[in-house]
Amino acid sequence: MFQDTSLSKDLNEDFKRHITATTPLQVEFSIQVLSTRSWPFQQGPQFCLPVEFVQSQSRFTTFYNKKHSGRKLTWLYNKSKGEIVTHCFKNRYTIQASMFQMAILLQFNDTTSRTMADLTDSTLLPKEVLQQVTQILVKNRLLICDEDDIEDNNTLTLNTAYKNKKLRVNINVPMKMEVKEEQDSTHKHVEEDRKLLIQAAIVRIMKMRKELNHQNLLAEVLSQLSTRFKAKVPIIKKCIDILIEKEYLERVDGQKDTYRYLA
């Protein structure tokens, strides 16, 4: 993970030198390129990248493909964020926002009102995601909705009277859906890590004992791992079966629920 972060820093510097030597981008742009093996992020919902960012994405993709042939970039827009500088309010604000939030706010560059249907067509975001994003923008008083509940036929209007004591405003808060997905992903990887620890404990015990019945093996595994986490018996049983399939263990013929270690 730390290596990916360091390599991304070098990659950004190389890309900046590249665009400086050719044609500068219209927006400031930086990226983190992370290995899927170390960073198991889930692909986000369907999304149409705003035209303001298409050139940056296209040029970086071309640059990266020339530098690393055979690799494929998967863009995680749901993990992207940026800053928008406003010119439509009395004061000039810097809005720190998610990519989805920026995509919606940019739709008000040439008009002060948009329907939810317009925003759906321009962003391609699923209804439940678009509703959550627009609710955050309405809650932060950047947009005004003509109804309390945001639906497809509602109109959203830019709040040109927007005021904030802070000139730098962060509205990039996680959506309920993102929090749940992150929690599910974290739980899944914790469970996978624990399975590996359980398997390692079983192998250590069986290597020392050579033969052991099921109940005693369970007791020793639970004891060994008690200082780290409380192992679940059904998971330990699954790990025993996995190790039998991998030929680390075998069941002893004629002896019920007894295992033998295979060197």
Image: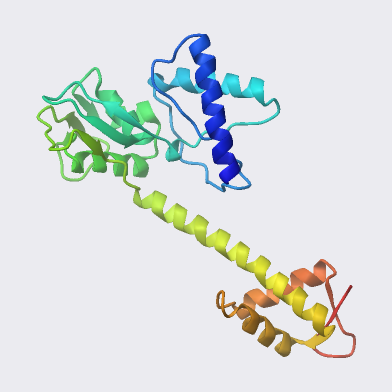
User: Image quarter for residue 257?
Assistant: bottom right
Look at 52% across and 9% down and name the residue there. 22
Residue 257 seen: no
User: Image quarter for residue 49?
Assistant: top left
The x, y position of residue 194, in whole percent, is 61, 68
Instruction: Note whether 58 is above or below 22 in the view shown.
Output: below
Look at 83% across and 71% down and name the residue there. 248
Q: Is residue 35 left or right of residue 51?
A: right
Location of the C terminus by quadrant is bottom right
Instruction: Note whether 135 is above or below 119 in the view shown.
Output: below
Look at 50% across and 14% down and name the residue there. 19
Residue 249 seen: yes
Instruction: Note whether 73 is above or below 16 in the view shown.
Output: below
Look at 72% across and 85% down and name the residue there. 217
Instruction: Note whether 121 is above or below 194 in the view shown.
Output: above
The x, y position of residue 250, in whole percent, is 85, 77
The x, y position of residue 52, in whole percent, is 38, 20
245 or 12, nearer to the observer: 12
